Each structure stands twice: as structure tokens, then as C-alpha cells.
Image (tube, rainbow, N blue to C red):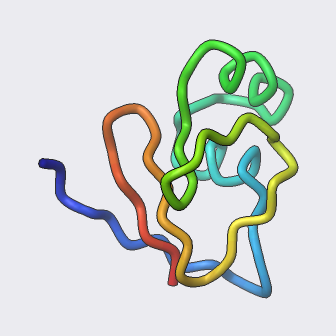
Amino acid sequence: MSIIKDFTIEGEYITLGQFLKEESIISSGGQAKFYLQDNPVTLNGELEDRRGKKLHVGDHLQVNGQEYEFR
């Protein structure tokens, strides 16, 4: 079981692509589409592959073996 990391959203939401870049999982926003095609990402228990998906306070995301909770 992994430790859940808290991620604070500045504003109403952050997109999945922006989050991946912010956490240095990818180095540029353009890589998000390809990363999501090749790597499973789970949002609130469901597979998610849309880089433009809006992440809101209370969401839970699992990516690259790490779990995040948005605040």
C-alpha cells in the first residue's frame, strides 16, 4: 500500500495533463497523450485516459504507482 500524497489545486480545477507535468511525470504537456496511452491512470477507481479531464478537490488519482488526493 502506498502513501497518499496530497496535491493542492490552485483555482477550481487542474487538468490531468497539467497535473502530470506539475508532478514531473512528463516533461511537456504534449507528452500527456502518449503517456496516457501507454500507462494506466485511475481516477476515483475508474481508468482515465483524457489529458483534458478536470481534476477537482476530493478526487483520488493513482498514477505511476503513487496515489494522490486533491485538496
Question: Residue furthest toward the left?
Answer: 1
Q: Position of residue 36 (x, y in %)?
A: 68, 26
Q: Quadrant of the rendered structure where residue 13 is?
A: bottom right
User: Vertically, is 1 above or below 60?
Assistant: above
In the picture, measured across the screen, residue 62 lies left or right of residue 48, that is: left
Q: Quadrant of the rendered structure where residue 54 is?
A: bottom right
In the picture, measured across the screen, residue 5 lies left or right of residue 58, that is: left
Residue located 60% across and 83% down the image: 57
Q: Quadrant of the rendered structure where residue 20 is?
A: top right
- Residue 58 or residue 24, whichever sits in front: 58
Residue located 17% across and 50% down the image: 2
User: Vertically, is 30 above or below 67?
Assistant: above
Q: Position of residue 15 (x, y in %)?
A: 78, 58
Q: Position of residue 53 (x, y in %)?
A: 81, 54
User: Vertically, is 15 above or below 21?
Assistant: below
Q: Position of residue 71 (x, y in %)?
A: 51, 84
- Residue 49 or residue 24, whichever sits in front: 49
In the picture, measured across the screen, residue 30 lies left or right of residue 36, that is: right
Residue located 81% across and 25% down the image: 33
Residue located 43% across and 70% down the image: 69
- Residue 27 or residue 67, whichever sits in front: 67
Mark count: 0
